[in-house]
Image: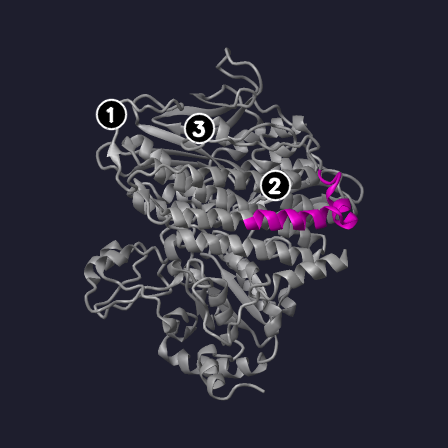
Amino acid sequence: MIKSWFIHGIRNGILTTKYPKTLPTTDEIPIKSIPPFGSKDSDWLKGKQICPTNAIEDQEKNVDFGKCIFCRRCSDTGFDFEDQNEMRNIALQAEGLLNIENRDKMHEDFKKKIMTFRKSLHILMIDVGSCNACNLEVLNLSNPYYDLTRLGIFFTNSPKHADVLVVVGALNYAMVEVLKRTYESMPNPKIVISIGACSISGGIFQDTESFVSPIHDVIPVDVTVPGCPPTPIQILEGLLLSMGKNNKQQTAEEKHNPPD
Amino acid sequence: MIPKFVEQRQIEEINGTIQISSIFEINGKSLAILTDIENSKTILSDMPLSLGEHVSLLLKEQTNIGVQTDLDIGSKVEGYGVFIFPYGPVSSGIPEAGGFKLITYGERIVKLIPQINFKKRGIERRVIGMKPEDALLLVERSAGNFSSSYSTCFITAVENILGLEIASSAKWIRAVAIELERIYNHLHVFGRLGEAASQNVATAQVNALKERVLRINAKYYGHRYLFGFNKIGGVNYGPFTTDERKGLVSAIKVIAKEFSNIVAFFLSSRIFLDRLQETAKLPKQDALNLGAVGPSARGSGIDMDDRLMYPIEPYNDIFIGIETDKEGDTMARTMVRIQEIASSTVILEQLLDRMPSDNINKPQLSSSNSSSSLPCNSDKDFSFCRIESPSGDLIHVVQLDAITGRIKFLHIRPPSLVNWLPLSKSLEGNVFTDFQFAFESFGLSYADSDR
């Protein structure tokens, strides 16, 4: 029995992605997970009318990834979905969500926290009203293609053991108190990652009667991973960001000084 | 203790087992969608006069927001040492916002009360007044892992009302998406069962196969969870060319073959089988009374499948093997899912080989009387559709405003909603540690039942 598993494993070879050492491939980030951005010819006014979640707001033709559900309706109005490597990195530090007074303090705090979590990270997922797609993508992180444990990241079952709270879904009235209590029962220092358009801004559910507010109005959020749902690689990027490993810099450095 | 599902019915000429699948109020009239299981037929009728206790609890939409609902039917359990063990909404076993009240005296589960609506989003009320194409974005995000079933069900109902005659190939591409969805959901369920039995190496292999199906979804439909490939009057993405179709078939065939190898490993593991056999038994009569659908019903020997009961194109044109198992335990439900992966592969092969080559995305207005022989109301005011989602029978009832073309009424009867009570019935008398096997084998999703 054990022997046959061994042979089976050998036959399959190494499935695990090379990310974060290399950039993700098109298999790992499919076309509908690449965010739109305004080009010269894009008609932002038309795009604004057509956008179901008001992600296109200003004349600068910027798209708010936190609101975008990647429906690709704005592709008719000149918004670009070109497969550009730098655009694949969409995990962000959540400073933009805060007002200016809090931002500096938050930045300092975040820098201190990520130093603590450099080597290992234990994550707990909480669902506050998702459609189950984000949940499955977070669970997919443990499959052989992504293999979280090689990076020192582990799932945990109790908020008492967790370093990172991964929040998915549009916050529902029934889950507000649950979310607060889960956050409070985590030991310090702690990081909150808000995953998916629903948890960052409400996404497509922002006008439903049960939606309370974005997560960052209830508990402080450190990192956001936009997407609907974000792919496992994009979630991994958010997790690496909270470990202080900004993969983009790392790849550039490693290119010149390969690790021995 | 369990109320009979159909106590009185108004249609007398049909004999055999009839289930109430859905109840809704439209134009001030109460209507019901009934299922004739023996003859594999769908019947639209006036509402039966009296209903079982749980029918009124389940099939009508609950409107309270922000409060969870306890699906509690039957008698109260009291006695020496009996206590309630709360489980959820933040738990390791269920990666979703939902809970249970396990009533127990220590080791065995006396009664299980599912708690749903922790994440009720109220999509049915939100879409009222929206354009169908805008509502589609919400509907397909009701349950992420059943999204192509949801979107196809909704779109088919809307197209019925509008009288759009769309290209056959678009319908076939939708069916391919539904079968792909079935395969990855069944793989997910199987992986969760393996994880619960601590078969870590084998589970990793199953999860790798699931990831491969998701990547096939992404390659041919643009999205890993099949969001946004569907549109009213056609499809946006899909395997359009012959090469793509051939590539899809061969990729899925390889996955099905590898899965059958892994299943052989699993089924030779005594530890795995011990956890599944005789666990959470759901006898056929209970499944009928409580209205179980999908693999859960087929595992109890009920031969019901929407692909036969409500055969929209292309399911009326191809061979569909319905897998049933009469044991009714977790093993039977798992075997049904394993066999369905194989049968879905055969269906995919037929679909992609024989796909008609007409112009996709060119909808036409059909003549006044639709050629469809499926039950549908005469004046085309509202329409409904049934799709066999991975967890079972999904029903959408849609009514459009005749002048503006906006949605006037939407009723969703998700498959998970009706499967909660069969789950709690099957777990009575089982030990605590069997809970996760039973829960996973039903393939339930809180997002689906809360919508």
Q: Nearer the viewer, mark 3 or mark 1?
A: 3
Q: Chain of mark 3?
A: B
Q: Earlier in the sequence, mark 3 or mark 2?
A: 3
Q: Which mark's residue is nearer the viewer, 3 or 2?
A: 3
Q: Residues within 10 Å of mark 1 (few under 14, many from 20)?
A: few
Q: Are marks 3 and 2 in contact (CB under 8 Å)?
A: no
Does residue A49 appear to the left or right of A151 in the view shown? left
Q: CA distance from mark 3 to mark 2?
A: 22 Å
Asked whether residue B261 is drawn in magenta, I would say yes
User: Magenta residues, as a range?
Assistant: B254-280
Expressed as whole percent of the image width and height from the top left, the position of residue A158 reads 65, 64
* Label 2 – label 1 distance at C-alpha: 41 Å
Q: Amino acid at mark 1?
A: Ser
Q: Which mark is residue B337?
A: 2
**Which residue has dot 3 on it?**
B316
Q: Chain of mark 1?
A: B
Res B367 label? 1
What's under tag 2, amino acid-wise?
Answer: Arg
Q: Secondary structure at mark 2?
A: helix
Which of the marked residues, 3 or 1, is nearer the chain's N terminus? 3
The x and y percentages for residue A255 are 47, 84
Q: At 39% from the left edge and 73% from the top edge, which residue is drawn?
A: A98
